[in-house]
Image: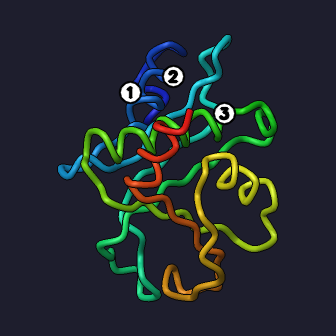
Amino acid sequence: MDRLIKYGDIESQHQHLIDEQSHQHKNGTGSWAILEKDTKKIAGAMILCQLLDEHHVPTQDIEVGWHLNRSVWGKGYATEAGRAMLDYGFSKLHLSVIYAVVKPEHYASIHITERLGMKALGLTTKYYGIELLLFQQTASDKIEKIENK
């Protein structure tokens, strides 16, 4: 309740949530709010950050990911934001590879990684201490896609 009082009116609260959701680390990675185009309401969050190992210790591997409100599923937000994050990671941060990890039962997220052109590498238990599907895209994959358009 203190937060509502501290940030006052609805517009101030909304901006605070956007600012809080949009957090960038010193290395350029972080999380960003995804806003609905028409309403500017928070639709979810996009991440480009270090993957955590089974002990939740950051690794050197960088992950792209998305977390969306159910109300916006299937509207293309994750794909659009994912493309932007991959482009940012390769062109601005000069990353050589970006990974995505998906729970095997999350079919929609698997389809998003496919639409993003990420390659499936199979199952792994290397991250977060659970079994996940691992996908990757390399900077050279991204360049090849651009040249073949």
Nearer to us of marks 3 and 1 is: 3
Q: Position of residue 46 (x, y in %)?
A: 51, 44
Name the secondary structure under disc 3: helix
Name the secondary structure under disc 1: helix
Q: Residue at image x 38%, y 58%?
A: 49
Q: Quadrant of residue 82?
A: top right
Left or right: 99 as drawn, with respect to 118: left
Q: Residue at image x 78%, y 63%?
A: 106
136 in relation to 19, above or below: below
Q: Position of residue 43 (x, y in %)?
A: 65, 32
Q: Which amino acid, by three-letter code, is at mark 3? A: Tyr
Name the secondary structure under disc 2: helix
First along the sequence among labels 3 and 1: 1
Labelled disc at residue 77? 3
Query: Which of these two is toward me, 79 or 35?
Result: 79
Q: Residue at image x 34%, y 46%?
A: 90
First along the sequence among labels 3 and 2: 2
Q: Quadrant of residue 109?
A: bottom right
Q: Which amino acid, by three-letter code, is at mark 1? A: Lys
| Residue furthest to the left | 26
Q: Is residue 1 visible in the rendered structure shown here?
A: no
Q: Position of residue 2 (x, y in %)?
A: 44, 36
Q: CA distance from mark 3 to mark 2?
A: 19 Å
Left or right: 97 as drawn, with respect to 41: left
